[in-house]
Amino acid sequence: GDSVTQMEGPVTLSEEAFLTINCTYTATGYPSLFWYVQYPGEGLQLLLKATKADDKGSNKGFEATYRKETTSFHLEKGSVQVSDSAVYFCALWPLGSSASKIIFGSGTRLSIRP
Amino acid sequence: SAVISQKPSRDICQRGTSLTIQCQVDSQVTMMFWYRQQPGQSLTLIATANQGSEATYESGFVIDKFPISRPNLTFSTLTVSNMSPEDSSIYLCSVGGQGNYGYTFGSGTRLTVV
């Protein structure tokens, strides 16, 4: 069945470091791909999305490119800030069926040191 | 995208009691979803709530424990019944899955059972 595998955390970086959080997926067809962020004590917020191969989603300095050849959707940011400390979830939504549901990865906790 | 108001934001409850969580959406939606997020874990879908029909529960979740109401297209409730400490989690409602817009989440209810 469809699944999402993402980099295990926690990930700890210094401020202004480069960030990559890996995400790969298994799916039939062409799913939509998402990154959600959960700040401490809050619900999930959609960070960015991509709906077809080679699409690049971007928001708040974060980027991720839908790579069908490697079935990946890695999250990157060139210079992280302390305020980026949160849990990041990669997710896919299988298209083609109204009954299909979004599938989440296990989440990656990111901590940024000042 | 839709805006979701979820309440309460947090509660501490005695074991054996029940808590009802409310989710209000600012637009009419066909499907609403309820998730559980256990400490340090990803999201697990509890059930899908369609207006005018019984909720559809995922494996491992039953109506007696998690009764759901969906009286109209903008509102739903989830009750956590006969609570035990193992029910301590964040509960989130969600709408979406239409087209490529992804899913929108409420801010979550952080439940602690003592």
Image: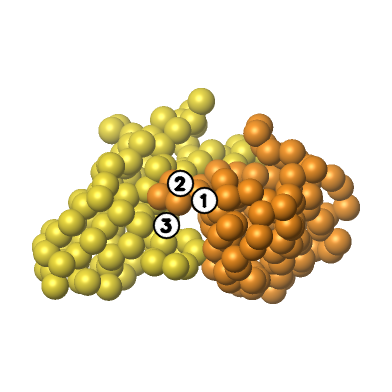
Question: In terms of image quadrants, where is residue B69?
Answer: bottom right
Q: Residue at x 74, y 39 (%)?
A: B62
**Mark 3: amino acid:** Tyr
Q: Quadrant of residue A58?
A: bottom left
Q: Quadrant of residue A13?
A: bottom left
Q: How many marks?
A: 3
**Can the viewer see residue A48?**
no
Secondary structure at numbered mark 3: strand
Marks 2 and 1: CB-CB under 8 Å?
Answer: yes
The vertical placement of A94 against B97, above or below, is above
Q: Amino acid at mark 2?
A: Ser
Q: Residue furthest top?
A: A1
Q: Are marks 3 and 2 on the same chain?
A: no
Checking the image for residue B93, the label placed there is none
Question: Residue B112 vs residue A6: left or right?
Answer: right
Chain name for mark 2: B
The residue pinned by badge 3 equals A36
